[in-house]
Image: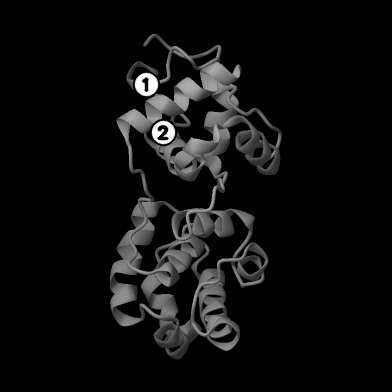
Amino acid sequence: MTPKKVRTIFERFAQANPAPTTELEYKTPYQLLVAVILSAQATDKSVNLATRDLFKAAGTPQKMARLGEAGLTPYISRIGLYKSKAKNVAAMSAILLERHGGEVPNDRAALESLPGVGRKTANVVLNTVFGEPTIAVDTHVFRLANRSRLAPGKDVREVEDKLLKAIPGEFLANAHHWLILHGRHVCKALKPDCPRCLIHDLCEWPEKTAG
């Protein structure tokens, strides 16, 4: 895909949604970190349903550490992989208190050293909380990047690296959210809504339907 096409894609995203953000509900950086950990292999909708009650009971690392793994589990039992997630969130909260004064660190290595936090989760936090130009390649971004030929790659890291190189700098701060939202709501896995796609004419997917 040509640089001109890429720029036009993000100009359209910016015009349609000037201030995109995550669909996860949170009030603090810590709550976002918890929500993103819980969102692995789960929908944002299911995570939001769980965290509304969870954050009322334990919305800080201090309260979460006191709640502990056993106390946390009932709040998230309807989310996939809830047992391992409960263990990770409880341990992560304790480590934040021990090593970082209860604050979410603005540092990739420190974030990725926390239980339950990998590169994708760290990218979400660095971008959404700290405004870093990072891109978390989830299933939606991976699909969109490959289908459209915006940044085709065999794995998430290859797609991430290609996106960071291809996207003009002025759009990087918001690119992560635009791509996720477009992949989730328009360029869907089973029934992509091509007629509603605002980049339909720029997309290079051979199987796209009429727009």
Residue 111 or 143: which is nearer the viewer?
A: 111
Rendered image quadrant of residue 30: bottom left
Q: Position of residue 153 (x, y in %)?
A: 68, 32
Vertical placement of residue 116 versus 13, above or below: below
Q: How many marks?
A: 2
Residue bearing the label numbered 2 = 182
Q: Residue at x 34, y 53 (%)?
A: 45
Rounded to the nearest angstrom, the CA distance separating label 1 from label 2 is 9 Å
**Of the residues shown, which amino acid type is indicated by label 1?**
Leu
Q: Does residue 40 show up?
A: no
- Outermost residue on the bottom side: it is 66
Q: Position of residue 168 (x, y in %)?
A: 55, 32
Colouring method of the image: one colour
Q: Position of residue 25 (x, y in %)?
A: 33, 60
Vertical placement of residue 16 versus 207, above or below: below
Vertical placement of residue 113 versus 144, above or below: below
User: Left or right of 56: which side holds 92?
Assistant: right
Residue bearing the label numbered 1 = 198
Instruction: Tell me the crowding category of disc 1: few under 14, some 14 to 19, or many 20 or more residues within 10 angstroms, Cα based.
Output: some
Rendered image quadrant of residue 123: bottom right
Q: Residue at x 55, y 80 (%)?
A: 96
**Of the residues shown, which amino acid type is indicated by label 2?**
His
Vertical placement of residue 92 versus 162, above or below: below
User: Left or right of 145: which side holds 77?
Assistant: left
Q: Secondary structure at mark 1?
A: loop
Q: Secondary structure at mark 2?
A: helix
Q: Residue at x 59, y 67 (%)?
A: 116
